[in-house]
Image: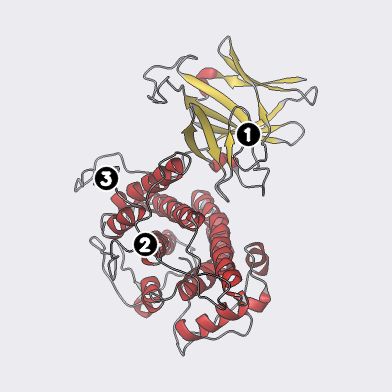
Amino acid sequence: MSVVEIGRLADLRHTRHSITLSNGKRLVLFRLPRIGRSDAVALPTAESSDSWTYYAMEAECPHAGGPMTDAHIDIEDSSYVASCPWHAYDFNVETGESSYGIKACTFPVTVQNGRVSIHITEIEDLQLAKIEAVSEKVKFKHGPRIEPSGSPTYLGEDASLCDWCVHILNTSNPEHKIELTTHLFSLFATREQTPSPMQIGAGTVVPPQEPPRQDLIQVKPGQMPKAGKGGNLKSRIMMLHALANIEQWAIDLAIDIIVRFASFRTAVQNEDKAPQQLPRAFFYDWLKVANDEAKHFSLLRARLEELGSHFGALPVHHGLWESATRTAQDLRARISVIALVHEARGLDVNPLTIEKFRNARDSESVDVLDIIHNDEITHVTTGHRWLTWICQQEGTDPVQVFRSNVQKHFRGAVKGPFNAEARQQAGMDKSYYEDLYGQPWKGDVIAGG
């Protein structure tokens, strides 16, 4: 058995830390407020060992290796549960047990004489090699604003998922959109584990034709100023601003696919099989995508401000929503064009963009872009999974369905160079995208979404 001393209690002020042991094994240490009898959690007002509880678990999800350092934390049955950001597998942070039937390794944590230690029974003589604080990924603005915007409007307990989605789509304030989106994902995920899950509300409300924007200068995609190669601050700000615009639209795209297609039913190929409605996992998956996009937008917006600019300082385009409009009548087309063309194109260009910032020694922006790239692989995976599910129900070939929808609804060629490794990781082999052309178009393919 090894008792690995992590450090002084007074130094561990973040909610989570990445731990690397001397044998290379990685853990995550959670620092969470103590839960009261009624499951109410109040942020401690004073630092003491009685105010917080500490939990340690393996840093890689046992399902598919997702980063538990980025896990979403909920409370279930008076216990903390960490959900993997990749596929939402949930684990009790104390026991490691999951509702999916697998188990994560957890390790007892003790606090004695002002010092925190982790107990590992299987291996002897382990020591701490490295500890890093993991910042909370979603960055809200809490400082003074030039134009105070107040708090967002939250819907009541009886509001359906579609009510929430239309409310978010109609929210023009980007800060409110971030807060409402992350709140909705947490609320929906938490209620899924209760006897009263949130009602979907399919067909009860109508999404807007185009979500409104606040104080932005809009231009056509082809009229956007060229950002350059990232060799100077102005160029990097332009690149980050363009990415932030894409991520804000990506929030709306993920929210819109939920409400616009909530009443979707699969097509019937024979009388022996009834049309299938979308399972609740569909709505959870796209809420997770929306939550990620809100995180991405918040990180990019914050980085712009750290560099002395702000979101809205430069013109933006609505090109992604034009693709949404062209695919508004068919869920298969929407997934094909938005998730498996635009978002997959992001997998191709992200490494090149990251390299430009790395060459400019902008490590803070590189960290943000790395997070976005890793998340976007899972978003393409989500699109591929649900197009495949629809095709399985309908007895069709997902590759052919994808290619036919791109040829009909997408403008331009699906051009390389392709990040074949990342695309394959998301489920897309070359049969999906090689030698594929949409409608005639001279502009560039917008990456992301």
The residue indicated by pointer 2 is 259
Checking the image for residue 266, the label placed there is none
Could you tell me how far apart the alpha carbons at marks 3 and 1 are, in whole angstroms? 33 Å
In this figure, what is the number of numbered marks?
A: 3
The residue indicated by pointer 3 is 154
Left or right? Give the position of 210 relative to 362: left
- Look at the image and tell me whether residue 14 can be seen: yes
Q: Quadrant of the N terminus?
A: top right
| Of 6 and 310, the residue lying toward us | 6
Residue for point 58% across, 69% down: 393
Q: Is residue 126 above or below residue 261?
A: above
Label 3 amino acid?
Tyr
Could you tell me how far apart the alpha carbons at marks 2 and 1 are, in whole angstroms? 33 Å
Residue for point 30% across, 39% down: 142
Label 2 amino acid?
Val
| Of 442 and 260, the residue lying toward us | 260
The residue indicated by pointer 1 is 97
In which quadrant of the rendered view does residue 201 lie? bottom left
- Where residue 194 sits in the image (x, y, percent)? 45, 38
Could you tell me how far apart the alpha carbons at marks 2 and 3 are, in whole angstroms? 18 Å
Q: Nearer the viewer, mark 3 or mark 1?
A: 1
Mark nearer the N terminus (2 vs 1): 1
